[in-house]
Amino acid sequence: MSERFRIAIVGSGPGGISAAARAAERGESHVLLEAEPHLSNTIFRYQKGKFVMDEPGILPLRSPVPFKAGSREAILDAWNESAARLKINVRHNHEVSAIRRRDDGLFQLDCANGARFEAQFVVLGIGLQGNIRKLGTPGEDLPFVQYQLDDPDEYEGETIVVVGAGDAAIENAIALAKQNNVVIINRRDEFARAKKGNETAILKAIEDGLIECYYNAAPERVDALSVGRKKGRMVLSTPNGKAQLLIDRVIARLGATAPRGFVEACGVVFPSKDPAAVPAISPQYESNVKGLYIVGALGGYPLIKQAMNQGYEVIEYIRGERVEPADEPLLKAKLGGMPGFRGVDEALARIQKNVRVLSHITPLQLREFMLDSDLRTPRPGETVFARNDYTNSFYSIVDGEVHIALDDAGQQHITLRRGEFFGEMGLISGRRRSATVKAGAGCVLIETPRRSMNRLINSVAAVKREIDEVFILRAIQSRFAPEASAEQLKEMVAGATLQKFAAGDVLFSEGEIGDCLHLVRVGSLTISRTIGGKDVVLSYVPAGNYVGEMALLGESRRSATARASIATETVRLDGDSFKKLVNRMPVLKLRLQAEYRQRAASNLAMQALPSGGDIIQFLLAQGAGEATDILLIDESLCVRCDNCEKACAETHGGTSRLDREAGPTYASVHVPTSCRHCEHPHCMKDCPPDALRRAPNGEVYIADNCIGCGNCERNCPYGVIHMASKPPKKPGLLSWLLLGLGPGPGEAPYDPKKSKKEPKEKKAVKCDMCKDEKGGPACVRACPTGAAIRISPEEFPAYAQSRR
Amino acid sequence: MNARHESILNHARSRWLWFSLALSLTCLIAYAWHSPSVPPNGGTWLGYTLGTIAGLLILWLMLFGLRKRSYSGSSSLRGWLSAHIYLGTTLILIALLHAGFQVGWNLHTFFLILMLLVIFSGFFGVYCYLRYPTLMTRNRDSATRSAMLEEIAELDQNALALADGIDPKVHSIVLRSIQNTRLGGGVLTQLRARDDSDAALAGIRAALEAREKNNQAAGGAKSGQTIFAMVDFLASGTNDRQAEALRKLIDLLSRKKALASKVARDIQYQALMEIWLYFHVPLSFATVAGLIAHVVSVFFYW
Ligand SMILES: Cc1cc2nc3c(=O)[nH]c(=O)nc-3n(C[C@H](O)[C@H](O)[C@H](O)COP(=O)(O)OP(=O)(O)OC[C@H]3O[C@@H](n4cnc5c(N)ncnc54)[C@H](O)[C@@H]3O)c2cc1C
Ligand code: HEM
Ligand code: SF4
Ligand code: SF4
């Protein structure tokens, strides 16, 4: 008993609904299968009243369903109205659990509720949110068992069981505990998965008896009760046997299962294990399974408008129509500057022919890649980027050549030509550019932002392999032997391997025989020695530097222990081939010895003050190892005037991005809650419009195209991002001082719109290190006593020495 | 920007100390070298010069308040404050030299005293700035004030809940003690670092002594009475579960007391670091008024 349609669309997100609408408009036989009782679950689950943004603004919308920036409610209403008007054949509560291509060429879709459909074509638009994990026990669907919490203040005086140990569970439990009796159930014996702040908060709440916690416990059953004061009962299995709780409500926050497993089971192939990898699809959005199309976030397009355009286009493609993709004009504008430009397709083909790393990818991937990238045609001699810039984009050379200066004077340089790439070091290490690059004759470059490049690297193994190989050669060359040719380095490069270390892992320990050296490529290390039975940190080694040469040059045993201070990747160089190289190149030997002496001297200096290492250790324990620039406050100088916060608020629209008081302190060194401008910013991980950027001086900032989704706020482990609406204007300082007009320095401006109940566009805000202020960070400048400074981890040893 | 912490006194290798010393020395030499026909006073050319310098210095010192609140620009406020302190101190010498050490019962001397008051309040401020931050950190022991206040509120809640299960009498005693906890308060309370738990402690002692004497609690004790009443309750040997709860209650209340006195001390330090500005700033405005009066009277009623 199955129904048959020509096109089955799975998932009614913006992609699916737009596809279904187009199919309905065209009179195609179709069905739209949606797991939930409403349309577009992802958007349905946005916070009430959320202002939804229509980035990218330049992209035109192409869909029978309307969409423009506005409140969540207005958008959902418009979509519901369109679905009814266009007579979309939607089936709610139909979660598709399997899709199989039968031998007769038809797809068979099985739903969790037992329904079965057959279709010639399938459009998969199930997004990335995945399915909410349920309790998995009898009673998981009872009305008082819920999997989301919109407003904790809604409940009062109830006994609520929160199941889960992640950030969402903890935040819910703490918020509910204000007015309710809360029990939290943790399957494990700790809350290690949560952010540090949440972990301490929940442990404290448990210790104070505010929240009761069952560790190593799991729900077995939930029953509804018809007598007594409580709505239900939960039976738990605990290490001490069974427990029974009388409850009013269960809130389970168990995360979601990523849709990947389901998609793979449909036969779609993912190029790599990396969670960021997206399946390869053709320019017509067809996957490797013939007749199965993928649109929207699942295919790697994380914005609503993109998903809607693809939904429209995919129906046209299935009908065999040729449509110019909606992004065609954008690409035309982008590529138009290419010398000899004739058309987008021709230009893309030329790029792919010329640039080898890009030859591995599909045409659709290339289109997307180019949409994110910029075409640059710098004049000969123009600087593409300068040494010590903090940019992290990646460049491919489509035509012409560039010169990479190896020394400051620009005497020695390497020339890269058509087809090669550069900028991979900054991209991989997350650190400053290691050399200045100038354009040569006839230069045509593609500049690709970090996110798109990382996605490509993680999606296409061949790209990763090629970049890694070149990285190793160049890293060795630039770090040790600029004068050596690739030929001379061949042996060493062949013996080099990439190694990964988790935070705290030991690369080598004091006293071992040394047989290799490590070039740090991502992350950082600490060098420590055991002195008087205690591990004393002597120095900090950031990415771009090497360790382990001491044992190869003279002493054969390791004189200290090297440990990863955060997740770290190194290039491991074989000791023998390194020794050979050193023997062949006396210059190198001299240089290494000079560096060696300098290191030994500074290690000795650190050793002389044992407490110095403790400060470094404390800072690293706060995650400072991944910082590029961290705000420290000396509490023996800080007079708690909060002028730093006022300065921040004053230079940033009335809200301070810095919380001076919060944060740990050790030996008077206080690490306030403020952005550290991480090497590999966690906040950048999952930003749909790619609004988190890094400025040339290293500042991680949020661009205007932020859509306010809150992902970065959740992803930052240091809790320094907030959601705020744009502030109204404030009168100047003098009118406040002399006339008492408006709010004073550091105070939030009055908001004339506040009383009106219209949704306000909330965006993420964070510290941008005052990149637009010529004097640098306002907090530091505004501190009257010099208690606030900003430093980078490289400066930790010197800083520790200055504090005695 | 420097990768280390420096105090206002040795900012930029004490640049402003050296500048001030040089300025003082120049003025002293000029004063010694200058031999006017009349005893040195503000009316000679050197007197005018020194007077002008001093007047401009005062105006510049006043600008600090404005600079503190303008957050763009590129200089550091620490540098400004360092200069403010050293040049402000130099003002004593310059002003005295300007006056030729002549004082009397007149408007001019009144203005001088006003200015000296500002300067000495500044000294006190520097003393506070150097001393209290460290004490404050040590007292706080890595907690924030709001966290401590939150914890106190929690302890109160827990204590109340516990007391609720014991006995209505105990409950009302705990409630009263909570209502009597007041932190912060007026300026004087803030400065005295007294929270009511202190009174409570005194209360306990008084109560204990009184009990020894006539087996009756002394009046007037507030939360001291609470703890005492409970000890009493314990001794009377009510049932075991209640005894256990009471013991817990005493733990809670003592933890709260420790916290409350910490917070009170914290408030005291903060108040000390702020209060002097309430003298320094109004007096400095008065000084400017004095300066204007001084200049006007010199030029017009000479
Ligand atoms: C908090 C937040 C705020 C955001 N704000 C914005 C914004 O302001 N502007 C913007 O452009 N983008 C925003 N985004 C991104 C945007 O929501 C997504 O890019 C977009 O929803 C992706 O659309 P989609 O069609 O690919 O999938 P989704 O919208 O995720 O829809 C997938 C649908 O498929 C259903 N489904 C899943 N599995 C099955 C199954 N097996 N069977 C049947 N149905 C299934 C789901 O229930 C859901 O309805 C935001 C994202 C988040 C998380
Ligand atoms: C006539 C001389 C002086 C005048 C007119 C003057 C004026 C001022 C003014 C207007 C402020 C700004 C306060 C605010 O707005 O918050 C200030 C702050 C201050 N002054 Fe003075 N001052 C003088 C001398 C001194 C001296 C001699 C010292 C120290 C030795 C001193 C130390 C300070 C300090 C420490 C601050 C506080 C900085 C802060 O935290 O904001 N002042 N003074
Ligand atoms: S550096 Fe600037 S933006 Fe960052 S916290 Fe300080 S004042 Fe604010
Ligand atoms: S916002 Fe958080 S994750 Fe992003 S750079 Fe700053 S500290 Fe790192």
Image: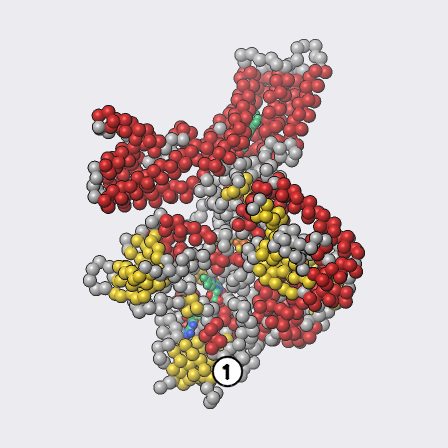
Q: Can residue A460 be seen in this view?
A: yes
Q: Name the residue under label 1.
A: A291
Q: Residue furthest top?
A: B38
Q: Which chain carries label 1?
A: A
- Residue in the picture at 60% in, 71% down: A461
Label 1 CB sits under 8 Å from any ligand 1 atom: no
User: Is residue A18 something one can see in this rendering?
Assistant: no
Q: Residues within 10 Å of mark 1 (few under 14, many from 20)?
A: many
In the shown orientation, is residue A138 left or right of residue A75?
left
Quadrant into which the C terminus of chain A falls = top right
Quarter of the image where one finds residue A96: bottom left
> Which residue occupies 43% across, 53% down?
A199
Q: What element carries label 1?
A: loop
Q: Residue furthest bottom?
A: A104
Q: Position of residue A681 (x, y in %)?
A: 55, 57
Above or below for A802 versus A47: above
Left or right of A75, for residue A789:
right
| Residue found 46% across the figure and 71% down from its top | A259
| Closer to the camera in the image, A47 or A149 | A149
| A801 horizontally vs A77: left or right | right
User: Residue A555, relative to residue B170: is it above or below?
Assistant: below
Residue in the picture at 43% in, 68% down: A257
Query: Which quarter of the figure has residue A690?
Result: bottom right
Name the spot of residue A346 as percent of width and height, x first: 66, 76
Quadrant location of the N terminus of chain A? bottom left
